[in-house]
Amino acid sequence: MSVDSNQFRGELQRRLPAITPKVLSHTLRQLERNGLVGRTHHPGVPPRVEYATTPLAGTLIPVFDALSDWTRAHLGEVLSAQSRYDADEFAATPHLPKPSDGQPSGLPVSD
């Protein structure tokens, strides 16, 4: 959800298939509680709920931009550190499965 777009709940769920409906609902409620997301009910059958980011959420854009820039600048170092850690962990506990997907754990991958 970008700062200037509204999304219906079902659209959000389709865009975020890895997130369970329960977790998405909980997260949206927390974002609403914190003033970062607004919710509009649309009556009908079925009723629809629309979410939009608030001006307060827009103030976070520079923070996320800085985090994104840092990630791009240091991703190679992070991946190297993860590889070293994983190799050490696997050597210490050979019964654990070895990481094989090559994705950085805990870091989102963007195109």
Image (cartoon, rainbow, N blue to C red):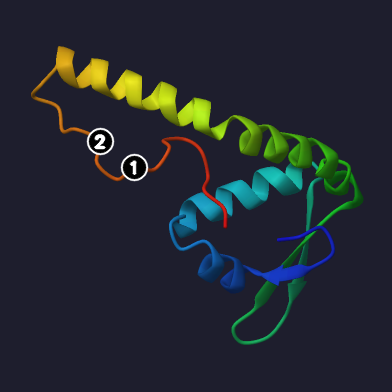
Point out residue 31 in the picture as x, y percentages from the top left corner.
71, 45
72 sits left or right of 53 in the view: left
Q: Which mark is residue 102?
A: 1
Q: For label 1, count other residues whose C-alpha is less than 10 Å away and answer few (under 14), some (14-19) or many (20+).
A: few
**Please, what is the three-letter code of the amino acid marked with disc 2?**
Pro
Residue 47 versus residue 49 in the image, above or below: below
Secondary structure of the residue carrying tag 2 is loop
Quarter holding residue 9? bottom right
Q: Residue at x 91, y 50 (%)?
A: 55
When the figure is inspected, residue 63 is found, relative to residue 36, above or below; the finding is above
Q: Residue at x 60, y 73 (%)?
A: 11
- Judging by the rendered image, the residue that carries numbered circle 2 is 99
Q: Which percent across, then down, holds residue 84?
A: 34, 20
Give the image quarter of residue 97.
Answer: top left
10 Å crowding of disc 2: few (<14), some (14-19), many (20+) = few
Q: In what quadrant of the picture does the C terminus appear?
A: bottom right
Percent of width and height locating residue 28: 65, 52
**Distance between the Cα atoms at labels 1 and 2?**
7 Å
Query: Does residue 82 sit above or below 44 in this rendering?
Result: above
Q: Are marks 1 and 2 in contact (CB under 8 Å)?
A: yes
Left or right of residue 71: residue 95: left
The amino acid at mark 1 is: Gly
